[in-house]
Image: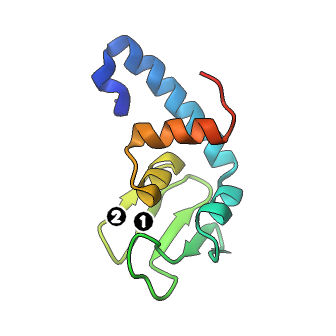
C-alpha cells in the first residue's frame, strides 16, 4: 500500500488510485519535468543523467532516471526510487504524500 495506508483501508484504496494517476501523468511528462527539476541534465539513451542536487555531486553519471518507467537511482549512494513522485519527494526533502499533493497542485489536477 502507498503512503495513505494510515488513513484507513477505504481511503487507502482511493489514495492508491490517485497516487497511481498522478504518477502516470508525471511519467507521461517525465522529460519536461526532469528538465525543470534537474536543469543541466541530459538525455542519454532513455535515461536522464544529471548531478544529484542533494549531495556534493561533481560529475554527472551516477544519478540516473529512466524516462520510460520512472525508476531512478544514485549509484554513488543507496538512494533510489520507482516513480516520479518518489523522485520529487527525494529532491525536495518531502514525504511521498507531500510530494504527491504538491505535484497535484503544480499539474492542476483535481481530487
Residue 67, horizontal then vertical, whole percent: 62, 59
Instruction: Please say if the residues under marks 1 and 2 sit with CB atoms less than 8 Å apart.
Output: yes
Q: Nearer the viewer, residue 69 or 26?
A: 26
Residue 92, horizontal then vertical, whole percent: 45, 56
Is there any visible trace of residue 2 in the rendered image? no
Q: Earlier in the sequence, mark 1 or mark 2?
A: 1
User: Compared with residue 66, is residue 74 higher up or lower down, i.e. above or below?
Assistant: below
Residue 5, horizontal then vertical, whole percent: 31, 25
Image mark for residue 73: 1
- Between the residue at mark 1 and the residue at mark 2, the CA separation in whole angstroms equals 6 Å
The quarter of the displayed image where residue 7 is located: top left
Is there any visible trace of residue 22 in the rendered image? yes
Secondary structure of the residue carrying numbered label 2:
loop
Q: Which residue is label 2 attached to?
A: 79
Residue at x-position 29% and y-position 67%: 78
The quarter of the displayed image where residue 40 is located: bottom right
Residue at x-position 42% and y-position 36%: 97
Amino acid at each position: 500500500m502507498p503512503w495513505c495506508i494510515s488513513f484507513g483501508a477505504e481511503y487507502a484504496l482511493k489514495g492508491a488510485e490517485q497516487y497511481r494517476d498522478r504518477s502516470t501523468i508525471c511519467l507521461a511528462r517525465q522529460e519536461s519535468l526532469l528538465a525543470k527539476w534537474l536543469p543541466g541534465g541530459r538525455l542519454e539513451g532513455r535515461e536522464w543523467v544529471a548531478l544529484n542536487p542533494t549531495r556534493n555531486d561533481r560529475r554527472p553519471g551516477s544519478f540516473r532516471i529512466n524516462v520510460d518507467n520512472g525508476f531512478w537511482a544514485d549509484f554513488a549512494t543507496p538512494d533510489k526510487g520507482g516513480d516520479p513522485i518518489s523522485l520529487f519527494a527525494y529532491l525536495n526533502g518531502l514525504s511521498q504524500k507531500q510530494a504527491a499533493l504538491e505535484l497535484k497542485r503544480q499539474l492542476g489536477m483535481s481530487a
